[in-house]
Amino acid sequence: MASKKPVIGILTYGRGDVAVENFLYDDYYASPSQYVDAVRRAGGLPVLLPPNEADLSDWIALVDGFVFTGGTDIDPTLYGGDPNHPNLLKVSRERDDTEMELIRRVMEDGAIPALFICRGMQLLNVFYGGDLHEHIPDVQNPDIHRGDDGFWTVQPVDVDRGSKLFEVMGTDHVKTYSGHHQGVKTVADGLVVSAVAPDGIVEGLEVAGHPYSLAVQWHPEVSAADDPSQQKLFDGLVGAAQK
């Protein structure tokens, strides 16, 4: 009998966060397909998890590991930021509230593996009491984290050789797909910096003492099909979930 594939829950965008051209429906819970592809290549069974679930105990019972995905900005009121910042994107409190509670459940359990990507890393830092730069260009010029069109760019990241992130990816220097205008400002207690950009912006965090709780500011799913160092983040997640 074939062994059971680890079930990996992929957190989706909130209702209406993504515009879909279909006159039949107004709102969608959506997720970029690259997350699904990366989990499948790693040998996991991907399941999409939309926000507003009434009882997250059902998710904990169903899923062996989680991917906290990218998306829109986190509500600044959660970290003492400026809710009127002119560059703030539309927030999604349904995602914020659901995922903050899920992080609490995952960390209380202490053994459920999780991968936090871009927005996910920022939310992890906020959960532990850290804060964010509402807009990186306010503190860094030039802004190396987005392209001239405000979207994807490829930027270098240096990884701490003593980190779990290095152990998983097998390299201390990576080229990453990024497209974020926000970033970690003050690193929360309980988190360890595992990677930084050339301009000093935090690019990787880990939960101290957790067997597999890795957070990256970039988007490994975008290049995972062609870059083994990025696919290994999903391979490691599925491997930890298998255990």
Image: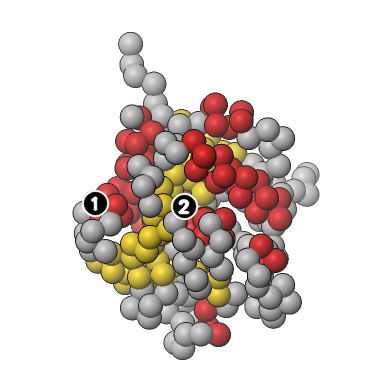
| Foreground of the two, 141 or 82 | 82
Mark number, residue 23 = none
Along the horizontal axis of the image, is 17 left or right of 47?
Answer: right
With respect to residue 75, does 20 lie above or below? above
Residue 132 visible here: yes
With respect to residue 188, does 94 lie above or below? above
Q: Residue furthest top?
A: 1
Q: Amino acid at mark 2?
A: Phe
Quadrant for residue 48, please give it: top right
Q: Residues within 10 Å of mark 1 (few under 14, many from 20)?
A: some
Q: Amino acid at mark 1?
A: Glu
Along the horizontal axis of the image, is 65 left or right of 86?
Answer: left
Q: Secondary structure at mark 1?
A: helix
Q: Residue at x 21, y 54 (%)?
A: 170
**Residue bearing the label numbered 2:** 116
Q: Secondary structure at mark 2?
A: strand
Q: Residues within 10 Å of mark 2 (few under 14, many from 20)?
A: many
Image spot of residue 38 (x, y percent): 39, 44
Quote the CA–CA distance across marks 1 and 2. 17 Å
Residue 225 visible here: no
Image spot of residue 192 (x, y percent): 38, 60
